[in-house]
Image (spheres, rainbow, N blue to C red):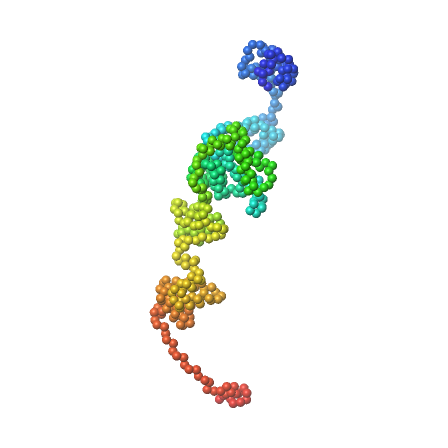
Amino acid sequence: MDVREMLRHLRNNQTDRAVARAMHVNRKTVARYRAWAIRHGLLTGPLPSNTDLHRLLDETMRTPPPPQNESLVEPFREVVVQLRSQGVEMAAIYERLKERGYSGSYSSVYRFVRRLEPPRIGVVARVETCPGEEAQVDFGSAGKMIDPADGRLRKAWVFVMTLSWSRHQYVEFVFDQKLETWLALHRHAFEFFGGVPKCVVVDNLKTAIARACWDDPVAQRAYRECAEHYGFLIRPCRPRTPEHKGKVEQGGIHYVKRNFLAGRGITTITQANQDVLRWVNTTAGLRIHGTTREQPLARFATEKAALLPLPETPYDLAVWKEVTLHRDGHVVFDNAYYSAPWHLVGQRLWVRGGAREVQIYTTAHELVATHPRAHSPGERITHPDHIPIYKLAGLTLSRPECRQRAAEIGAATAEVVDLLLDHRPEDRLRTAGRLLRLGERFGNPRLEAACARALSCDDPSYATIKRILQQELDLKPLPTLAAAPPARAFVRSASELTGHLTGGVTWP
């Protein structure tokens, strides 16, 4: 109750009933204050200052509080103080006091410690920025929404970017917090605003900050590249201090939940994103903001001119990932396989995955491979130059290629290769490949001659042809086959040979 206001009514000679009605108090209270004022001469002459008036009121009018009963913990004060200085929790203190004869409750211990250590109220300073200077971003849970791709009900997240000066915001619902999603949301927000703030305040989530610390925070490589493309600075919050981005916490995430999502039925995420943008430009944008006392859209009309211009081309949404080059000469990125030079096997590399191509770098930022982006999981993209020469032949070997190369060498070689490829049931494709590589070692003319010699001997095997080349038999002329001797008729008749079986003439 305002004592000076009470005295003003009393000094105007108003009745107790009138004063009670004006001050909204009981008439007995007015009578007590009138008697007190008369006793101290406060109804005439100048009034003392507020400080002196309240001091006089405390000393002569107000009843002191009743004495408090001594806590059962009081005899153990020194023990409690010592245990608390050692960081012992209240439940453990309660157990230690019971060992020393304490018979009170845990609640008494709790109240006693709270009086010893009154809670400290943190002091904060509100930070306001200039137009276009800063934006704050955050993710928040948005319940469940329907995935239009398959009709399933999935957990959704809400992304909010709030411009710190105007409080205008961009809102979008997504099903994950992946790095690709995080980068795409920034692109959508900047395009929605038609410009880029000079600084973006982010929480220490892994999609944005690789190492969270106050002195030397390290942003994810892909997020740094995005920031360089659009020209904004990344300002991570201090770890465990979400109040450093309170504009997007309270006026963004919480406001979306309390206003847009509250009481809303389950819908598809596509419909929710269409509805929330209308909400941003109507309900949220046209409200009188509690801090600025202006409409966010009205302030945004001024702030938009202070934003950095959008670059000519949007960010490629490239994702960086540190990988290892495996023994097969491929790295794994987004469930697909990409080759890199074989001499880097076992080393750590960086993969930059864009929308159209994938680039592979060494840790020294040297570009070592570029591939088109795979279209499906499990796809393997291999550049021949990345495979050792002695492995390449077997990797690229095919039946049509073997037949074509054999035909280019000669008819005999083509016939041998056809025999190898047509063999069943064993697959002799690799044998045919080794046979053709003999031409690289000994020359194609010699291979053709060796195949011709092997065919003439009716032994066109790989081992025989290789032995012919090693022993240089292919350099000798093919042997001329002698004429076959004339066939001879039997000199005895059949009856002579089988007569003993029929009782006839026997063979002497």
**Residue 207 visible in rendering:** no
Q: Is residue 78 above or below residue 492?
A: above
Q: Is residue 271 above or below residue 344?
A: above
Residue at 62% over, 30% down:
105
**Residue 455 visible in rendering:** yes
- Return the residue found at the far bottom: 505
Residue 268, position as x, y percentages in the image: 57, 42
Could you say which quadrant of the image residue 415 lies in?
A: bottom left
> Residue 127 versus residue 290: which sits nearer the camera?
290
Left or right, residue 390 beside residue 114? left
Residue 225, position as x, y percentages in the image: 43, 41
Residue 427, position as x, y percentages in the image: 47, 64
What is the quadrant of the N terminus in the image? top right
Residue at 49% over, 40% down:
188
Left or right, residue 336 beside residue 64? left
Q: How many marks?
A: 0
